[in-house]
Amino acid sequence: MSKFLLPENSVMLSSDFIYGVATASFQIEGGANNRLPCIWDTFCDTPNKIADGSNGKIACDHYTLWQQDIELIESFGVDAYRLSISWPRVINKSGELNQEGVNFYLGILDKLKAKNIKAFVTLYHWDLPQHLEDNGGWLNRETAYRFQEYADLISQAFGDRVYSYVTLNEPFCSAYLGYEAGIHAPGIVGKEYGKKAAHHLLLAHGLAMQVLTKNSPDTLNGIVLNFTPCYPASNKSEDKFAAEFADDYFNQWYIKPVFDGQYPEILSQLPKEHQPDILEGDLAIISHPTDFLGVNFYTRAIYRADEQEIFFQIDPPEPRTDIGWEIYPQAFTELLTSLNETYTLPPIYITENGAAMDDKIIDGAVNDLDRIDYYNKHLNAVHNAIEQGVNIKGYFAWSLMDNFEWAEGYLKRFGIVYVDYETQVRTIKASGYAYKNLISQR
């Protein structure tokens, strides 16, 4: 199959359903000499942290090639482009705007607006300025207030050019992978750190929502959360309990405070030293009303009971993507319907969905039928959730192009556009043409 097939009556084929592509600043921009260092620069410079020993100094050189990249985005016929702002590019150490960095994004936003492409702007996609990390990073409550100041300044500077603001992308990854498991920047390891970092990130979200609501009341303002639904390895009660605990720990921990103003009940079961420092009024700030929820989905996880750790994730079954994640689209529908049943939610946008595949460029083409199959099944999973009453307004493919895939370096390719990192030549993959075809059918 070389195209995506949705049911003819699907809401996703109506003209007001938004289709987009997504990227992130550190993953594509390069231009490292034109900004302050961030935690990912430091992490990349630390031996054995990045699988191929690479870094983000050049990446896809979007810093230089942004104009041609926007032409590329336009060629897909998308309604929207989700990009992230590099905090260390736009804010000086003094806390004031770096006008050169701001101008880079103003150029992009103006060009998108001229092409009638909606700008979905993410304020934080993991590239914390290193000087803030040196002061404790997300373990320091003050970082949440520095983020609010940044959100305040940049939302004023961008004016009416933005369609939607996202405060944070995937705070789970920043908190758990960065400050607990240590496999992402800044590489801190310890269960006593993860939930503390998570709380300060969520506080930063709420504080930023306050200024976005004031400065930019006409944009859609919200947060992007990633979900990896947790399934039990068997029908045994202990495995079910393990999966439920893991779900609270990894998934509900980030959504429940935003929409219910409280953490999951497992909070009281965590050792005291693992619990976050919650001050009076924090949860009221975190649960500031949002205009939408961004949902990122790639795969599910399967857990069995574990005497030491409560839960243990077993190896994912086949089929898997090139990054080793199980392909299980049914979990996408089940996730969306369960979130809809559990919380009173604003409209949902699927802000990331996609697959790393072992792409080969042969005779100038990339015939990624495996990725087309992944997208087709997951687009239909979204359709099925909408049929079951979930209010989903749009879908963003991750990613526009192959890029720096964090701890994997450049070894894993998620793009619907192939990037030759030596020449910086972009080649649209078969999945890119299939996506274009879907969008044109509406």
Image (cartoon, helix red, strand yellow):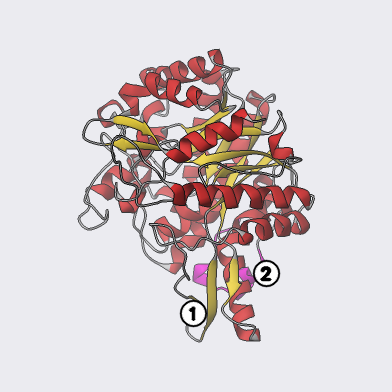
The front one of 6 and 85 is 6
What residue sits right under mark 1 in the picture? 309
Q: Position of residue 84 (x, y in %)?
A: 47, 34
**Would you say residue 170 is visible in this rendering?**
no
The residue sitting at 75% across, 59% down in the picture is 342
Left or right: residue 285 compared with residue 422: right
Circle 1 packing at 10 Å, graded few (<14), some (14-19), many (20+), is few
Q: Which residues are magenta?
A: 264-279
Residue 277 belongs to magenta span: yes
Mark 2 or mark 1, which is nearer the start of the sequence?
2
- Name the residue carrying label 2: 265
Residue 223: % across, % down: 60, 42
Query: What separation in Å lies between label 1 and label 2 (alpha carbons)?
Result: 17 Å
The amino acid on which the numbered mark 1 sits, given as a three-letter code, is Glu
Q: Quick one: SS at disc 1?
A: loop
Residue 330's spot in the image, x, y percent?
A: 63, 61
Q: Circle 2 sits in a helix, a strand or a loop, which is it? A: helix
